[in-house]
Image (cartoon, coloured by chain):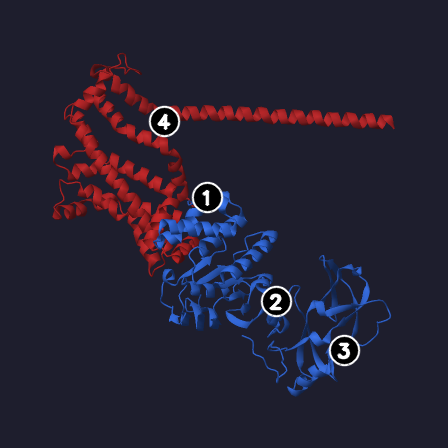
């Protein structure tokens, strides 16, 4: 039950490499924060600094208003789950889970009670006397979770806890961790490179790149209103489509394709002086629709494109084609029967597109209804 | 049509037959090879075992038979009481207790202290760790005899002559080889284990004791065996530092059979065999660890 604040936190390695720069975050009690980004973006470093495994080069880190910079990990009252589980191979499941309690000199009955409670919660009752070697990946992961919940720590840290599991198990454990959090309501910080995990589990997502926070926000905000092209491309699968072009006569011109832009979007683009400038337009694959038959063809905003690849994913079909020389992916309903090489008409839902300053990659926002997320 | 089928069938049969011949051939080759291997290994072991046989046979001969020429391959008379006479020729009971005391202390010291130092070098980051480790390793290159006299002077100034301190205390200060061996082993333990324990609230000492020691057992067994061997067979140390006969070790005790004029070879061999026995037994039981530990040196596991 705790509030966490990081203020202007930096991490330098060997005085040359800056792994994390100017990291600012304030976490409310009970939140589930997910740090997400490509490998090497500094997300794990942030987590390790919070855990106390890595020194904070500069900046301040508070738990419940107390400065934690120089407090050793054992006095921070945190629990952490590691990617490779870090179970002690020579101890039974029970001893693994009891380890921290024993060190903190809990009474024997209390240890037994807590371990058994956690085991029940995670379905490990039958396995308490086994060694980690005799467990499956999912079971080991559960033991690692159990080890961190028995202590009832203030803060729960998870460093890519699911990436060693196979896809099906990952899906299952994802739901289980989410359930666990809803029950225990422990403030949690979770690191992953998997945007799906981030989207499904987080109360707030922090997207990082090269040690810099790109955006902080609820999954829906981040998905619907990406601050820049990086966030747009990183969150969501398949990725957002990006097309470089410019606004001419109320139309977005990509090479030889012209697309009408709705008046409300034109208004703020015009106001902020982006007409005629180099822009990037972003549109999610699900906002590109397939036009049926010939009757709608030729209407405004329809784009004739040759399908290169058609992938059935189950509920949807992904259509790969080109817009001029730029690749385009459309997500359409699954039973469309479009075969590669076929020419089809696609149309953009222009109310859902985003415009980004091409050079800076930053989203151009309607100035008045400014809602700062995070 | 039928002819074609018959021909095809025949061809298949031929193929099967030739395949059989081929595999038979490989089997015979393998058998031959293993026979050759067996003969070579047997000859090798005989060669290596022959001195030990010579010890055993000498230990059972009478002194007169030891001196006969040509020497006999096995004793004409089996004098089993040589062993009893040997043991009674000097206070070997006391020597045995003394040796066991020293050896136990050295083994305990070596196992705990070297493991603790190695944990520090492997898992505790601190400034100058690399340089310090290099200095520790470099002590391996100093021959023991170079430090013999300074060490003697040091211990005599500490008034430790004619005590067990010079034989036992150095074991509690680590040895470069053991530190290196154990550090390599610690490197194979994932850092996450240590970090997880740190977060759980354990101190480095606690982590070493509850996680480090149990996980490095094979390497610790190697250290125990090597240090046991060293302490048990040490001759020079006790010779230098011990004056009172009541403090003597087995290796010193064996010297009673070596006279200035003549050596009682049969008793010396009997005594040596008795002294060697614990080492041989130990080797048989811990052979696995011996080989494992030495393999680790080359980086493998």
Chain letter, colour blue: A
Q: Position of residue A201 (x, y in %)?
A: 57, 62
Mark 2 — residue? Answer: A235
> Residue tagged by mark 3?
A258
Identify the secondary structure beneath mark 4.
helix
In the rendered image, the quadrant that contains the C terminus of chain B is top left
Nearest the viewer among A321 and A52 is: A52
Residue at label 4?
B48
| Residue B197 placement, left or right of A176 | left
Q: Colour of chain B?
A: red
Q: Secondary structure at mark 1?
A: loop
Q: Looking at the image, tell me whether mark 2 or mark 1 is earlier in sequence order.
A: 1
- The reply to the same-chain question for discs 1 and 4 is no
Q: Chain of mark 3?
A: A
Query: Is residue B237 shown left or right of residue A124?
Result: left
Residue at image position (68%, 27%) is: B19
C-alpha separation, residue under disc 2 versus residue under disc 1: 39 Å
Q: Is residue A263 above or below residue B151?
A: below
| Chain letter for mark 2 | A
């Amino acid at each position: 039950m705790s509030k966490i604040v990081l203020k202007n936190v930096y991490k330098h390695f060997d005085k040359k490499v800056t792994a994390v720069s100017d990291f600012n975050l304030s976490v409310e009690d009970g939140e589930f924060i997910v740090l997400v980004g490509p490998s090497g973006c500094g997300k794990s470093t942030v987590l390790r600094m919070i855990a106390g495994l890595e020194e904070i080069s500069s900046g301040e880190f508070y738990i419940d208003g107390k400065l934690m910079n120089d407090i050793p990990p054992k006095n921070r009252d945190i629990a952490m789950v590691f990617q490779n589980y870090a179970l002690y191979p020579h101890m039974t499941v029970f001893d693994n889970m009891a380890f921290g309690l024993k060190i903190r000199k809990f009474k024997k009955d209390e240890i037994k009670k807590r371990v058994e409670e956690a085991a029940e919660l995670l379905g490990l009752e039958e396995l308490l006397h086994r060694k980690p070697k005799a467990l499956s990946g999912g079971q080991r992961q559960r033991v690692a979770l159990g080890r961190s919940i028995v202590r009832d720590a203030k803060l729960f840290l998870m460093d890519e806890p699911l990436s060693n599991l196979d896809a099906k198990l990952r899906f299952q454990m994802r739901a289980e961790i989410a359930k666990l959090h809803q029950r225990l309501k422990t403030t949690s910080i979770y690191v992953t490179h998997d945007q799906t995990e981030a989207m499904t589990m987080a109360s707030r997502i922090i997207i990082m790149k090269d040690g810099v926070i790109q955006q902080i926000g609820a999954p829906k905000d981040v998905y619907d209103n990406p601050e820049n092209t990086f966030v747009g491309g990183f969150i969501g699968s398949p990725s957002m489509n990006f097309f470089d072009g410019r606004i001419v006569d109320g139309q977005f011109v990509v090479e030889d394709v012209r697309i009408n832009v709705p008046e409300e979007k034109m208004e703020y683009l015009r106001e902020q002086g982006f007409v005629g400038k180099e822009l990037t337009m972003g549109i999610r694959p699900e906002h590109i629709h397939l036009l049926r038959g010939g009757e709608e063809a030729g209407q405004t905003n329809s784009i004739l494109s040759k399908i290169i690849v058609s992938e059935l994913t189950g509920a949807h079909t992904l259509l790969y084609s080109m817009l001029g020389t730029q690749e385009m992916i459309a997500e359409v309903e699954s039973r469309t029967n479009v075969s590669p090489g076929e020419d089809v008409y696609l149309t953009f839902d222009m109310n859902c597109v985003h415009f980004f300053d091409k050079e800076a990659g930053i989203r151009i926002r309607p100035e008045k209804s400014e809602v700062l997320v995070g | 049509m039928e002819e074609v089928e018959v021909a095809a069938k025949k061809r298949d049969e031929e193929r099967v037959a030739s395949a059989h011949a081929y595999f038979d051939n490989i089997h015979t080759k393998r058998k031959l090879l293993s026979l050759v291997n067996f003969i070579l290994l047997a000859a090798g072991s005989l060669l290596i075992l022959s001195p030990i046989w010579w010890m055993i046979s000498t230990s059972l001969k009478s002194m007169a038979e030891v001196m006969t020429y040509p020497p006999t391959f096995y004793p004409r008379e089996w004098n089993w009481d040589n062993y009893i006479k040997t043991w009674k020729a000097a206070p070997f009971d006391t020597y045995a207790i003394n040796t066991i005391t020293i050896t136990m202390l050295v083994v305990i010291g070596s196992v705990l202290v070297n493991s603790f130092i190695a944990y520090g070098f492997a898992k505790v980051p601190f400034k100058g760790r690399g340089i310090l480790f290099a200095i520790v390793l470099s002590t391996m290159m100093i021959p023991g005899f170079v430090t013999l006299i300074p060490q003697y002077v040091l211990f005599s100034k500490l008034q430790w002559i004619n005590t067990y301190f010079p034989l036992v205390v150095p074991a509690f200060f680590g040895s470069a080889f053991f530190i290196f061996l154990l550090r390599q082993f610690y490197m194979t333990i994932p850092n996450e284990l240590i970090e997880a324990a740190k977060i759980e609230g354990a101190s480095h000492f606690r982590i070493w004791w509850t996680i480090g020691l149990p996980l490095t057992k094979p390497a610790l067994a190697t250290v125990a065996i090597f240090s046991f061997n060293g302490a048990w067979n040490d001759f020079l140390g006790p010779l230098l530092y011990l004056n009172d006969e009541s403090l003597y070790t087995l290796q010193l005790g064996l010297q009673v059979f070596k006279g200035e004029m003549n050596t009682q070879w049969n008793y010396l061999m009997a005594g040596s065999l008795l002294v060697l026995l614990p080492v041989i037994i130990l080797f048989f039981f811990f052979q696995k660890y011996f080989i494992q530990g030495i393999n680790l040196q080359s980086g493998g596991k």
